[in-house]
Image: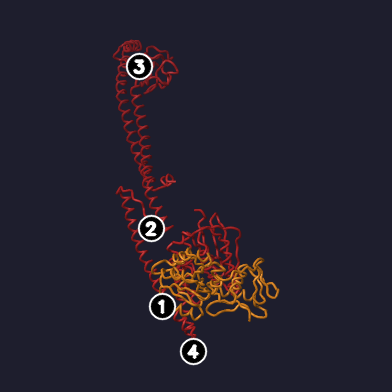
Chain colours: A red, B orange
């Protein structure tokens, strides 16, 4: 998991680019060293071969074949010329004088530079010492080969080659391992930050990113993020405290107020007009209290405390209950409320809250959908994820206002005069957030489809 | 032993609310004792026998739930009506309701409180063992889950039957909308629409249409009452 993240991380990609560039430069330097070294060594041996060749050619031209044969014989027996090779052959390739067993089969060119491995047997031919020589064919048809054993040079070049290849490979290997380790460390720290962010989104602001105490830049980032979280938590706490206090402090006077009004209402001491006035006031006070209750309820849901009471619920059962409850209301409006889904659609959550959310959506669909239209409520499992959809064939919600409708007290122009307080969808959004569910709104042409995608149970 | 089924203990720390409660409950024919803190409630709860004890969740000294638990441990069997502010309606409170008691969210209407007290008080003195309940010419069979009037079957959906059963069990008593939501749908919130009225309206059409007399009556501003004419 971490390895996969390491290999796909941008740090690792940067490291790969760096290794690649570095590798190309190192290879170029080593190749240059190798080529120029071998070139230098070769040119030195070439000069001495050339000088020797010129000597022998001069003798051939002055004293002819016999003179050269004599010189070659003299040279081959001279210790000072050890390491040199000589061969003189007549036009029929018969050897006239040489310190090589036979004319090297690889040296077929009539003139010019040649390289071959000299040895007696065929088996040794590939492994024998490397020779470099100059061939020339005289006007008479005689062929002369003058050369030197360059196996030292050969070995040197081979060693340099091995050093270059193994050096470059080692550098690549070390750089690769180093970049994986470095990237892994970076990714590990980022993963910690990510994990904390996810935990905060899932359960609340009380989580903090762990510090390693290394005082490096990652610790400083984590420290600052933690300070920021601390600040947000304090602010949220203050806001919550204010609303809680408000809720608590208002509740008592409201209870008293309602009690007094009710007492007056039931005392029958007033005439009919005053009685109606009192009744209306109580009704309005109740409406205020309901809004108040809804706000407190949404705040309570958003505080995420109810997550502890989550258990496995069957969405089919809950939607069936909602549909049953709202069936009469749909009937009254002449609409047809249909339920799709059977068996088990398990999800993890709070039954009351899910009921409330679906009830709000169904209520909206009946209220704002077409009178005499269809409202379809479905619960099913799609690719392992439980999903509830509520579809109507009413006017829908304009695309540009779809995000707005979740705001508290927001009401569409078209529904300003239907009863409601603009809190229903805020509650749906709060419930969805608490459950980690995704809300999807789409056109059902005509009408609106509302979908609640719950996370697959057990994830 | 003093007491009986019209005696109620009110535990409430807000003096004005307490005063209103005592006054209105007394007017409604109850004998009311008042305790203004948890210790007072513990003392009174064990010295007299009450039909119902109403207790505020937030008391100055001891938590209302703790007081209730202590009284239970002391062998007090009276049903409790927990009065709680909305934010405090947690699982503990909901769990209590399942145990046979009830709760009410502040601020509440007095008639709502009265309806619940009536229901709780009755529960403590009768335990119905019959499998067929009758009100006037209505009979509901708790085993086969069917209802009929004058022997003629009424076609009811399962929840409609549950609603009718709840009304029948509380015959002659006012049942509020919130009580119906809690007991029939097990919902602990107010959907803040007239959804219950519409639903009861449909049940009423099925039960009362083309009958000699209506059984389900609307009580304005509160809820419903099922009763046969005297």
Q: Are marks 1 and 3 in contact (CB under 8 Å)?
A: no
SS at mark 2? loop
Left or right position of A124 against A392: left
Q: Nearer the viewer, residue A99 or B3?
A: B3
Check contact, mark 2 vs mark 1: CB within 8 A. Answer: no
Decide which of tag 3 and tag 4 comes sooner along the chain.
Answer: 3
Q: Which residue is mark 4?
A: A271
Residue topped by disc 3:
A85
For this rendering, which residue is in front, A25 or A16? A16
Q: Position of residue B176 (x, y in %)?
A: 54, 74
Q: Residue furthest right?
A: B151
- Give the mark count: 4
Residue A206: which numbered mark, if any? 2
Q: Residues within 10 Å of mark 1 (few under 14, many from 20)?
A: some
Residue A397 seen in render = no
The vertical placement of A319 against A14, above or below, is below
**Residue furthest out toward the front:** B1
Earlier along the polypeptide chain: callout 2 or callout 4? 2
* Spatial CA span between label 2 and label 1: 40 Å
> Element at badge 3?
strand
């Amino acid at each position: 998991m971490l390895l996969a993240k390491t290999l796909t991380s941008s740090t690792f990609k940067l490291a790969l680019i760096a290794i690649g560039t570095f590798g190309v430069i190192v290879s170029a330097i080593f190749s240059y060293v190798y080529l120029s070294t071998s070139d230098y060594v070769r040119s030195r041996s070439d000069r001495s071969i050339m000088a020797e060749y010129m000597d022998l050619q001069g003798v051939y031209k002055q004293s002819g074949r016999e003179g050269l044969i004599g010189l070659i014989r003299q040279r081959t027996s001279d210790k000072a010329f050890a390491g040199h090779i000589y061969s003189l052959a007549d036009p029929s390739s018969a050897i006239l004088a040489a310190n090589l067993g036979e004319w090297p089969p690889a040296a077929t060119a009539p003139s010019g530079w040649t390289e071959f491995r000299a040895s007696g047997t065929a088996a040794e031919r590939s492994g024998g010492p490397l020779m470099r020589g100059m061939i020339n064919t005289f006007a008479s048809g005689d062929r002369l080969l003058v050369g030197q054993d360059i196996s030292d040079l050969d070995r040197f070049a081979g060693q340099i080659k091995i050093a270059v290849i193994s050096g470059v490979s080692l550098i690549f290997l070390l750089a690769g391992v180093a970049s994986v380790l470095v990237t892994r460390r970076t990714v590990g720290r980022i993963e910690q930050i990510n994990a904390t962010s996810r935990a905060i989104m899932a359960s609340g602001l009380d989580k903090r990113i762990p510090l390693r105490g290394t005082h490096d830049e990652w610790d400083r980032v984590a420290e600052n993020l933690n300070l920021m979280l601390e600040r947000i938590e304090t602010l949220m706490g203050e806001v919550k405290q204010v609303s809680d206090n408000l809720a608590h402090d208002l509740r008592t006077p409201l209870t008293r107020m309602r009690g007094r009004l009710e007492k007056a209402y039931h005392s029958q001491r007033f005439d009919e007009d005053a009685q109606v006035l009192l009744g209306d006031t109580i009704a309005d006070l109740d409406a205020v209290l309901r809004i108040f209750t809804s706000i407190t309820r949404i705040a309570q849901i958003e505080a995420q405390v109810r997550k502890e009471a989550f258990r496995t619920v069957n969405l089919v059962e809950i939607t069936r209950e909602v549909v049953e409850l709202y069936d009469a209301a749909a009937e009254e409006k002449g609409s047809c409320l249909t339920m799709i889904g059977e068996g088990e659609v398990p999800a993890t959550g709070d039954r009351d809250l899910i009921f409330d959310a679906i009830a709000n959506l169904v209520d909206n669909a009946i209220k704002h959908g077409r009178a005499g239209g269809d409202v379809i409520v479905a619960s099913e499992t799609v690719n392992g994820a439980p999903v509830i959809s509520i579809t109507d064939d009413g006017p829908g919600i304009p695309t540009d206002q779809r995000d707005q409708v979740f705001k508290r007290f927001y009401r569409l122009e078209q529904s300003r005069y239907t009863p409601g307080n603009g809190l229903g969808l805020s509650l749906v959004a709060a419930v969805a957030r608490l459950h980690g569910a995704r809300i999807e709104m789409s056109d059902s042409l005509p009408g609106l489809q509302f979908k609640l995608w719950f996370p697959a149970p057990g994830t | 032993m003093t007491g009986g089924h019209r005696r109620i203990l009110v535990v409430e720390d807000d003096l004005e609310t307490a005063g209103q409660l005592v006054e209105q409950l007394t007017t409604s024919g109850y004998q009311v004792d008042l305790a203004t803190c948890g210790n007072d409630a513990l003392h009174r709860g064990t010295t007299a026998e009450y039909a119902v004890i109403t207790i505020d969740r937030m008391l100055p000294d001891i938590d209302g739930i703790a007081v209730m638990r202590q009284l239970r441990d002391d062998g007090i069997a009276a049903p409790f009506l927990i009065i709680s502010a909305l934010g405090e309606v947690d699982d503990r409170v909901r769990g209590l309701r399942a145990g046979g008691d009830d709760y009410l969210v502040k601020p509440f209407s007095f008639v709502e409180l009265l309806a619940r007290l009536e229901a709780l008080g009755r529960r403590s003195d009768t335990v119905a063992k019959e499998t067929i309940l009758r009100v006037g010419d209505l009979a509901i069979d708790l085993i086969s889950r069917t209802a009929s009037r004058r022997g003629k079957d009424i076609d009811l959906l399962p929840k409609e039957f549950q609603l009718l059963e709840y009304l029948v069990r509380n015959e002659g008593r006012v049942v509020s909308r919130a009580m119906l939501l809690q007991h029939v749908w097990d919902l602990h919130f107010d959907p803040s629409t007239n959804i219950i009225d519409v639903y009861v309206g449909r049940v009423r059409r099925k039960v009362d249409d083309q009958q000699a007399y209506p059984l389900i009556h609307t009580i304005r501003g509160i809820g419903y009452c099922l009763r046969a004419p005297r």
